[in-house]
Amino acid sequence: MAGPQMIMFDQEFKQISAIIERLNHEANAKVCYLVDKNGQLIASAGETAGIDSTSLASLTAGNIAATSGLAKLLGENEFSIVFHEGQRDNIHISLVGQRVILVVIFDSRTSLGLVRLKVRKISNELADIFNSLAQKAQSSGSQKTPFEEITDQDIDKLFSD
Amino acid sequence: MSFINWASREINCKIVYYGPGLCGKTTNLQYIYKKTKPEAKGKMISLATETERTLFFDFLPLSLGDIRGFKTRFHLYTVPGQVFYDASRKLILKGVDGIVFVADSQEERIDANMESFENLKHNLIEQGYNLDQIPYVIQYNKRDLPNVVNTPELRRMLNQKNVPDFEAVASSGQGVFETLKAIAKQVLVELKKGK
């Protein structure tokens, strides 16, 4: 497989959740999401009820993938920020450390400037955690994954309708 | 690239349906969506043109249940099959854990199948994968049409590696879940091996 699996551990999950909670609060945003580049939701904070977070994660990743395809066409390394302005809500999408996508949804209670400022400040913190997570996942490569012990029966059981 | 979340005890895998234009990739997902219990599925998203041709991708999140206390989730994607959407196909292959190659069994689509299969191999290599190392299955779709090539012949052309393969009529559901189960199982077995 290309690249190692992403593995999230309890400790880092708590740290990441705390950081995006803080971002949501400090930027006065409605909701913040952290999504991996393949479209899987990692964490969220704020008014998540009423938003289909799985779909949001997949579409965001598609959006970032298409944007980075455009960047490469133009000889740019990456367009690291995408911003969409709506009548009521706006969405600010940015790449963190080339690994994950930070999504901030906000309305007129705050401003794009404040969101950008807070996102930039917090991105380094998040990037550090994801770097150490990647190292931890690699060094724990020899340790057991939850799937090492599964049996063929366990798998078959999933499909017994 | 699967995502194992110890904090929420979830495992997420990505399966991509690949194949030539109009072979029935979206139809496979639509049937799965229609026949899956509401609590086991999320919303199906189709980014399509006005004429319902896939423009970027279709997406369907499925929850298969628990294995040893871990929720297993599969994210199903289709690629746009039309030749000129190659840039989009490459993007969707990123992070893939398993592939379903949907072939159109009709005689006049044989060349399109072969071209798409070669395109899959090529695009995987570009993304740093290799079809020899990634779980995949093949589906021979549209078996109900009159002008189909017989399955042994299709197998000879597309399935030289002898991976699991299935005859299907995606519009009526024949073979759809068999295909999905086979790829999901292969992906889980691969995870069990530990990368």
Image: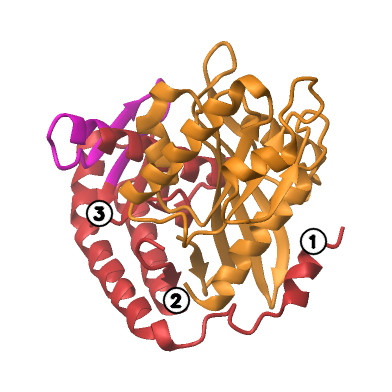
Chain colours: A red, B orange
Q: What stretch is highlighted in magenta?
A: A70-94
Secondary structure beneath label 3: loop
Q: Mark 3, residues whose alpha carbon is within 10 Å: few (<14), some, or many (≥20)?
A: few
Q: Can residue A29 be seen in this view?
A: no
Earlier in the chain: of badge 3 and badge 1, it is 3
Q: In this view, does A65 lie above or below B84?
A: below
Three-letter code, disc 2: Phe
Q: How far apart are marks 1 and 2 (CA)?
A: 28 Å
Horizontal side of residue B91 vs A10, given as left or right: left
Horizontal side of residue A124 vs B159, given as left or right: left
Do the residues marked 3 and 1 share a common chain?
yes
- Give A154 or B21, whichever is nearer the viewer: B21
Three-letter code, disc 3: Gln
Q: Which residue is drawn at the image coordinates 24% and 39% (left, top)?
A: A81
Farthest-out residue, right: A161
Q: Which chain carries label 1?
A: A
Three-letter code, disc 1: Phe
Q: In which quarter of the image is the N terminus of chain A?
A: bottom left
Q: Residue A9 carries which label?
A: 2
Res A157 quadrant in image: bottom right
Q: Residue A98 carries which label?
A: 3
Q: Mark 1, residues whose alpha carbon is within 10 Å: few (<14), some, or many (≥20)?
A: some
Q: Is residue A77 above or below residue A67?
A: below
Secondary structure beneath label 2: loop
Task: Say which residue label 1 marks.
Answer: A159
Q: Which chain carries label 2?
A: A
Q: Which residue is drawn at the image coordinates 38% and 74% (left, top)?
A: A12
Q: Position of residue B76 (x, y in %)?
A: 59, 45
Earlier in the chain: of badge 3 and badge 2, it is 2
Asked if residue B191 lies in the magenta stretch, the reply is no
- Give A12 or B150, whichever is nearer the viewer: B150
